[in-house]
Amino acid sequence: MYLDTDIVLSQIKKRDWLKDIVRRKLSEIYENLSTSAITVVECQIVLLREESRGEAIKVMERIESLKLRILSLTKEVLTKSTELLSKYPKLNIFDSIHLAHAILEGERIPSTDHVFNGIKEVVRIDPLD
């Protein structure tokens, strides 16, 4: 299963409204979990903006503690991401990269991001369901 940034952030931030909900959902999942190198960057951006530089520096360590496989940003991912950007105008660049990873890995994607609902190539799992 490929974890979107909001799911990862919920687990690495000190306080997050999704923290307990996601923790329970993930404890029910018996699959390998992965995310992207771009998730690390997004998390660092958010924590630098919302908390502190010190919290942003701890992102990699915290993601590794979740035992997530971190997928590399490859030419294949970027090509798929570009296809998705052209096909789905509501996607932003980060979302298209996450979707490209999920699609290429054949994974579902837990996320609160409803923009993923209209994407035929992937199944979004709503953690609030």
Image (spheres, rainbow, N blue to C red):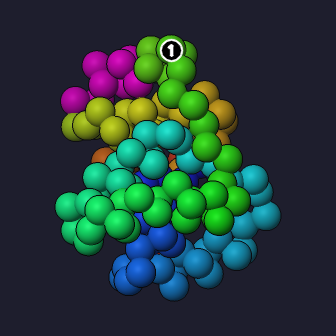
SS at badge 1: helix
Which residue does the image show at 60% across and 37% down from the upper left? 71
Whether residue 127 appears in this view of the structure is no
Whether residue 58 appears in this view of the structure is yes
Mark count = 1
Which residue does the image show at 36% across and 40% down from the upper left? 95
- The residue carrying pointer 1 sits among few (fewer than 14), some (14 to 19) or many (20 or more) residues within 10 Å by Cα, namely few
- Closer to us: 122 or 44: 44
Q: Which region shows up in magenta?
A: 81-89
Give the residue pinned by disc 1.
75
Circle 1: residue type: Lys
Query: Does the magenta run of residues contain 84?
Result: yes
Q: Within the image, what quadrant is residue 84 found in?
A: top left
Helix, strand or loop: magenta stretch: helix
Residue 73 at what x, y percent from top left? 51, 27
Which residue does the image show at 46% across and 59% down from the upper left? 59
Query: Does the magenta run of residues contain 51?
Result: no
- Closer to us: 59 or 24: 59
Image check: 84 left or right of 80?
A: left
- Closer to us: 62 or 128: 62
> In this picture, is 50 found above or below 69?
below
> In this picture, is 53 found above or below 99?
below
Which residue does the image show at 39% across and 45% down from the upper left? 41
Residue 118 at what x, y percent from top left? 36, 42
Image check: 29 left or right of 59?
A: right
> In this picture, is 102 found above or below 64?
above
Image check: 39 left or right of 71?
A: left
